[in-house]
Amino acid sequence: MGVVGYCSFERALSHRLLLLCYDSITVKYANVSVKFPEELNQELERFLDETGVYTNKSEFIKEAVRRHLVELNNEPALSALRIERLLARAEQHSVSDDELLDRLEDLRDQVDQAALADAVESAREATADEFAEQS
């Protein structure tokens, strides 16, 4: 899957234009069949025809699912449930310290240190610029 990031462009009068950039060659899609009442389908089709906000039902449904997932992920009760389940799994499948250290070492090896240093430096500069503008 691609990488989502942001590109920042400085503009005149201290305005900054932020664009979301999606760097990917291909995106894999899953086929999902959704059944809902005919009245809801008609209401959705009427909305799409009247507004043109979404190009098709698939786009509308993808966006609705994304928004619902964000809402659910921000729900404290569900966060607590996730943590409980993760802890239960961790108790059932204990991992030795050596195995954990090996996993951490593998993750460290996957990090591009130069890119990380550049990202940290860019973030520091952006923060310093924002602080200077506020002062």
Image (spheres, grey):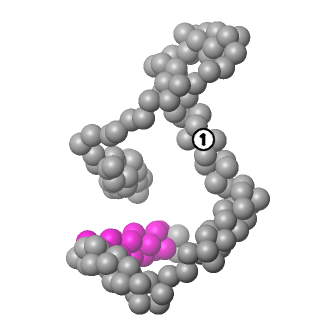
Q: Residue under circle 1? A: 67
Above or below, 74 against 134 in this view is above
Q: In the shown orientation, is residue 118 left or right of residue 52? A: left
Task: Say which of 59 and 32 sits in front.
Answer: 32
Residue found 33% across the figure and 49% down from its top = 1
Range drawn in magenta: 115-133
Q: Quadrant of residue 38?
A: top right
Is residue 118 at least partly visible in the picture? no
Residue found 38% across the figure and 79% down from its top = 103
Instruction: Pinpoint residue 83: horizontal percent, then vertical percent.
Output: 67, 68
Query: Quick check: is 119 in the magenta stretch?
Result: yes
Is residue 135 at least partly visible in the picture? yes
Amino acid type of disc 1? Answer: Arg
Above or below, 1 against 77 in this view is above
Q: In the shown orientation, is residue 74 left or right of residue 105? A: right
Residue found 29% across the figure and 74% down from its top = 111
Instruction: Pinpoint residue 56: horizontal percent, then vertical percent.
Output: 48, 19
